[in-house]
Image: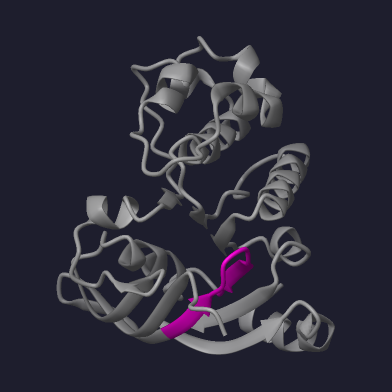
Amino acid sequence: MATPMLEVRDLHGWYGESHVLHGVNFDVREGEVVTLLGRNGAGRTSTLRAVMGLIGARKGSIKVHGQEVIAQSPHRIARLGIGYCPEERGIFSSLSAEENLLLPPTLAPGGMGLDQIYAMFPNLQERAQSQGTRLSGGEQQMLAVARILRTGARLLLLDEISEGLAPVIVQKLAETVTALRREGYTIVMVEQNFRFAAPLADRFFVMEHGRMLQEFTQAELPGQIDRLHEYLGV
């Protein structure tokens, strides 16, 4: 079997004195979409932040393309071709939408050009010269996703990209994830919106109290609905 694009083993993480991840294990194959499910506080966002080196301390093993990164700094991890879209979006208010889009550095060859991005997100082309924080919530989320596509990253970590958005925008983001999967991107999503995540992912990992409780595939999903109601309250 090919080396996973991302392999996490016995991952522990801390914010100060708070031990938030307790031996997390999972892997993601190239071209796969996986979703981390769980209630608020389960450790899903902390797992993404730990992969990027953005929590206070971590130990265990995190491999990207087989390369150990547990001791590397965030900017070096990003340069392995990882794009992180945080829940808070990180749009710069002093820059236009297009300036926000052009701000991140190139991480690897093959990033999308502006023409490709505007074809995927026509709203952003229409609002290109608008101040970043004057965009609607949905447009800001599109901008946050589009910004990492320009960098050449092929492994995308997407944190709650559907949260608080109108159904029409959520549908557009679902279409975007589907299109990126067809293009060979590898995607790890943290999602509270199970209806959004359910049709998109190849595999699902359920987290609780900083641990992985269960893994199941898209084919196994119908048989897991009752248990998911119990875990997630959906």
Q: Residue at x 63, y 67 (%)?
A: 32
Q: Residue furthest left?
A: 17
Q: Position of residue 204 (x, y in %)?
A: 64, 76
What is the number of callouts on the image?
Answer: 0
Q: Position of residue 219 (x, y in %)?
A: 81, 81
Please determine whether, in this image, residue 211 is positioned above or below residue 100.
Answer: below
Say whether residue 37 is magenta: yes
- Image quadrant containing the C terminus: bottom right
Q: Quadrant of residue 107?
A: top left
Nearest the viewer among 3 and 174 is 3
Q: Residue at x 61, y 45 (%)?
A: 164
Q: Quadrant of residue 206?
A: bottom right
Q: How is the image coloured?
A: one colour
Q: Residue furthest right?
A: 222
Nearest the viewer among 158 and 87 is 158
Span highlighted in magenta in the image: 25-38
129 sits left or right of 91 in the view? right
Q: Quadrant of residue 197?
A: bottom right
Please determine whether, in this image, residue 136 is positioned above or below residue 226.
Answer: above
17 sits left or right of 220 in the view? left
Please determine whether, in this image, residue 66 is positioned above or below residue 189.
Answer: below
The reply to whether residue 209 is visible in this rendering is: no
Q: Residue furthest top?
A: 129
Q: Position of residue 101 (x, y in %)?
A: 46, 26
Nearest the viewer among 51 and 131 is 51
The reply to whether residue 28 is visible in this rendering is: yes
Q: Position of residue 124 (x, y in %)?
A: 60, 22
Main SS type for the magenta part? strand
Say whether residue 193 is magenta: no
